[in-house]
Image: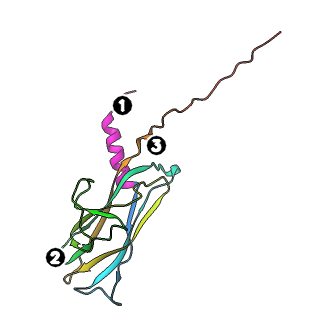
Amino acid sequence: MTINLQEIRKAVQDYLDHKVNTSISKLTPDVAGTINPDEEFTFSITATNPKTENGGIRLINVRYHLHSTDPAKVKLKVPPVATATARSGYSSSDAVLAPDTLVADMYLFPTEDTLDVDDIDTISGLKGKALALGNPNISFRIYADVDMDYLFPKNQNSGGSTRTVPIQ
């Protein structure tokens, strides 16, 4: 049997793209009615990892990327550190963003950075600010690593065998 290791790499990318579900909640204006320029709104993000029977695997080092497609019209407000640490990039060595600043992109590093099999993680109370009329989008995706100890468990035992010892 020939194994092409590139297939494993592609499978991890496909898993994150097609098995892990991400969603952004309905946007709730801070001022009742509609979202107008110079007004803030609140939303939540959710990442869902599938069940074992649907091919779920454990993910670690999970980070959440939020992005405004048109920062001239809408920006994201950096949340308090108690919600998650916001950084300028997906690496833990990237600059920490100051809470309450408005940004086009941010990577959220939650305190609990594991997305287990059949797990649903939500970060609530996130904010954005409308700057101008239009229909800009906010996008959300996750970055994560496959938990190699979950995928390739160590110290596993095999099925056993027994033999009767005939003592006469």
* Picture coordinates of residue 29, whole percent (x, y): 33, 84
* Picture coordinates of residue 86, whole percent (x, y): 28, 64
- Amino acid carrying label 3: it is Tyr
- Left or right: residue 143 versus residue 50 is left
- Determine which residue is flagged by label 3: 150
Q: Quadrant of residue 81?
A: bottom left
Q: Is residue 18 above or below residue 10?
A: below
Q: Does the CB distance between marks 2 and 1 fall below 8 Å?
A: no
Question: Residue at the spot x=56%, y=31% of the render?
Answer: 157
Q: Please report the bounds of the magenta region as a residue range.
A: 1-18
- Amino acid carrying label 2: it is Ala
- Left or right: residue 158 versus residue 107 is right
Disc number lying in front (3 or 1): 3
Q: How many marks?
A: 3
First in sequence, mark 2 or 1: give its number: 1
Disc 1 element? loop
* Picture coordinates of residue 12, whole percent (x, y): 35, 46
Residue at the far right: name it.
168
Task: Say the numbered circle drawn on residue 3.
Answer: 1
Q: Quadrant of residue 21?
A: bottom left
